[in-house]
Image (spheres, rainbow, N blue to C red):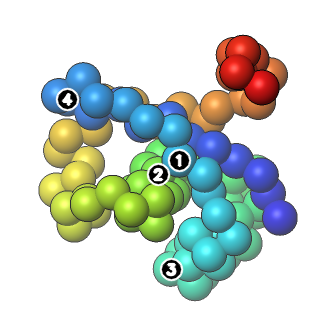
Amino acid sequence: MIAMRLEVVTEDGSEGEFPVTPKVQVEFERNFKTGIGKAFEQEAKMEHMYWLAWKSMHYAGKVVKPFDEWLNKVVSVNVVNEGDRPFDETA
């Protein structure tokens, strides 16, 4: 499994981090007819990253519009490196 979290920022200023779960990864491969590793190493397209973010938000329980409508409101999608996340001081 490829462990990945994506940060999504929208026009209204909201932002959130969403995990790219195994279910999202399999749906990606079925939708794009290619392995996720190959897609990002050899056939990198921004559509791939945005699609993963859109589907990850959906499976995280967020209400999302159809993909093209959702894209109209997106400002950025970024991969979150675990090393970049602040420590949880409550733990």
Marks 1/2: CA–CA distance: 7 Å
Which tag, 3 or 1, sits closer to the chain's start?
1
Mark seen at residue 31: 3
> In the image shown, does 41 or 21 lie closer to the viewer?
21
Mark seen at residue 11: 4
Marks 1/4: CA–CA distance: 17 Å
Marks 3/2: CA–CA distance: 14 Å
Question: At label 2, which amino acid type do we have?
Answer: Ala
Q: Which residue is mark 2?
A: 53
Residue pictured at 43% horizontal, 36% vertical: 16
Marks 2/4: CA–CA distance: 15 Å
Residues at marks 1 and 2 touching, judged by CB atoms closer than 8 Å: yes
Which tag, 1 or 4, sits closer to the chain's start?
4
Q: Which residue is mark 1?
A: 18
Q: Secondary structure at mark 1?
A: strand
Q: Secondary structure at mark 2?
A: helix
Question: At label 1, which amino acid type do we have?
Answer: Phe
Q: Residue 15, image x and y in percent?
A: 37, 31
> In the image shown, does 46 or 67 lie closer to the viewer?
67
Residue pictured at 20% horizontal, 29% vertical: 11
Question: At label 4, which amino acid type do we have?
Answer: Glu
Residue 64 placement: quadrant: bottom left
Question: At label 3, which amino acid type do we have?
Answer: Asn
- Disc 1 vs disc 4: which is toward the camera? 1
Which tag, 3 or 2, sits closer to the chain's start?
3
Q: Residue 59, image x and y in percent?
A: 46, 66
Residue 26 placement: quadrant: bottom right
Residue pictured at 63% horizontal, 44% vertical: 5
Mark 1 crowdedness (10 Å alpha carbons): few <14, some 14-19, many ≥20: many
